[in-house]
Image: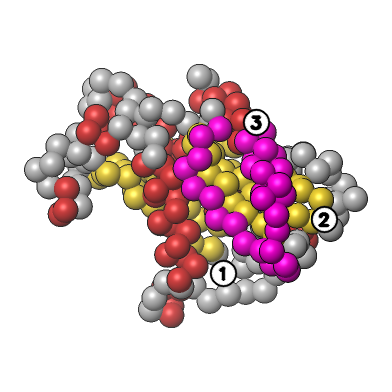
Amino acid sequence: MRPSGRLPNQLRNIVLEPGFSKYAEGSCLARFGDTHVLCTASVDERVPPFLRNSGKGWVTAEYGMLPRSTHTRTDREAAKGKQSGRTQEIQRLIGRSLRAVVDLPAMGERQIKVDCDVIQADGGTRTAAITGSYVALYLAFQKMVSLGILSAVPMAGQVAAVSCGLYKGTPVLDLDYAEDSNCQADANFVLTSDGRIVEIQGTAEDVPFAQSEFLALLDLAQQGVAELAALQRQVLGL
């Protein structure tokens, strides 16, 4: 039995609330159970220096956790003067994941910056951030189309993410903190809506795990991402 009482192949209660932020061109509050991440997408008419005069756009991301998003307060990284390695790794992952489904030349020479702020953490903050960021980014592109800046939404597919792990020897979908902190192995899967792999981050927390166990986790992830992608389409009206 999982601590939450869920079935092995059952997601947490997922809520994607589009348009949560009043001012951002696109926004989404992603709730994966008790993990809540606010994702906003902001349009910048300038690209980074390395893309000037290239005819291509860019999508990048920033990630952060509010001081009391966990059981104990954590100082803001800005107060420390630098980001942690974990923060840098996660925000790069979010950016790579989104760019995998964006037609960068079709954006023109402009940039969209996606900010992911963890309001409350109970495991899977990066997967919630990626899933919610897709919605925020799509809404930002939709607004640009409505303003006549773009002729069409420059996205070639959908992307979402979910964690899976071996908990007490059983492959389970969408780990919360109670499972993540006690599992034998866990992995974050970033996949397209049709099950293609964008990125996988997997670790044996106890002893090495077998290929058959990894494939069982991949099967669960593909099922979970398909459900998340369907919810993305639903909230976007696609």
Which one is in front in this view, the residue at disc 1 or the one at disc 2?
Answer: 2
Query: At x 69% / y 64%, what residue is drawn?
Result: 208
Query: At x 44% / y 28%, what residue is drawn?
Result: 157
Quote the CA–CA distance across marks 1 and 2.
34 Å
Which one is in front in this view, the residue at disc 1 or the one at disc 3?
Answer: 3
| Colouring chosen for the image of the structure | secondary structure
Residue type, label 3: Glu
SS for dot 2:
loop
Residue 197 colored magenta?
A: yes
Quote the CA–CA distance across marks 1 and 3.
31 Å
Which one is in front in this view, the residue at disc 2 or the one at disc 3?
Answer: 2
Q: What is the magenta range?
A: 195-223
Q: Is residue 119 left or right of residue 94?
A: right
> Badge 1: few (under 14), some or many (20 or more) residues near its Cα, within 10 Å?
some
Residue 147 in view: no
Q: Which residue is mark 2?
A: 169
Residue 134 in view: yes
Q: Residue 227 bears which disc, if any?
A: 3
Where is residue 206, by image quadrant?
bottom right
Residue type, label 2: Gly
Q: Is residue 156 left or right of residue 234?
A: left
Q: Is residue 115 left or right of residue 106?
A: right
Instruction: Residue 105: give x, y in percent of width and height.
Output: 22, 33
Instruction: Residue 144: give x, y in percent of width and height.
Output: 30, 29
Query: At x 50% / y 40%, what residue is drawn?
Result: 197
Instruction: Give the answer, above or below, for where 120 lies relative to 20.
Output: below
Count the marks. 3
Q: Which residue is mark 1?
A: 67
